[in-house]
Amino acid sequence: MKGQNITYPYIGVQITEGRKSYYSTDTFVYIVSVEKNSPAKKGGLKANDIILEVNDVKVSTAAMFKHELYKHQIGEEVKIKVERDGEEKTLVVKLGSQAKTA
């Protein structure tokens, strides 16, 4: 396996985690940036969106978000619920692919 390319689902966002307040233990996933011409851009995701759910499964950490994406096949469409400007929106993103060398 070493030296081989591994292909996995990709949408083209840089994410980070945040907390609702300084004292809160509640975390959320926040989109820092969206790559140009990426599946995320085509699906309507934007920087500053807070990701709430992937296919109706709540996500509150970057690991949970990635886990939910990786459950799906390249080319599948996933519903991503976000909070943007205080409103919730559900967007559909078709998963692209990205290769990594193992």
Image (tube, rainbow, N blue to C red):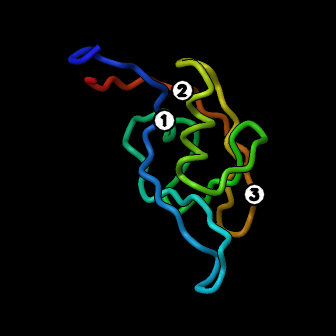
The quarter of the picture where residue 67 lies is top right
The quarter of the picture where residue 100 lies is top left
Type of amino acid at the residue the image marks with label 1 = Ile
For the C terminus, give its image quadrant. top left
Q: Residues within 10 Å of mark 3 (few under 14, many from 20)?
A: some
N-term mark: 3 or 1: 1
Q: Is residue 5 left or right of residue 67?
A: left
Badge 2 marks a residue whose secondary structure is loop
Badge 3 marks a residue whose secondary structure is strand
Q: Position of residue 84 (x, y in %)?
A: 65, 62
N-term mark: 1 or 2: 1
Whether residue 14 is situated above or below residue 84 in the rendered picture: above
Type of amino acid at the residue the image marks with label 3 = Glu
Q: Is residue 86 left or right of residue 2?
A: right
For the N terminus, give its image quadrant. top left
To which residue does mark 1 refer?
11
Q: Kindly indicate whether the residue at mark 1 contacts the one at mark 3 (C-beta within 8 angstroms).
A: no
Residue positioned most to the bottom: 23
Whether residue 84 is situated above or below residue 2 in the rendered picture: below
Whether residue 87 is situated above or below residue 95 in the rendered picture: below
Q: Kindly indicate whether the residue at mark 2 contacts the one at mark 3 (C-beta within 8 angstroms).
A: no
Q: Is residue 90 left or right of residue 20?
A: right
**Which numbered disc covers residue 95?**
2
For the residues labelled 3 and 1, the Cα–Cα distance comes to 20 Å
Q: Position of residue 13 (x, y in %)?
A: 45, 46
For the residues labelled 1 and 2, the Cα–Cα distance comes to 6 Å
Q: Position of residue 34 (x, y in %)?
A: 43, 48
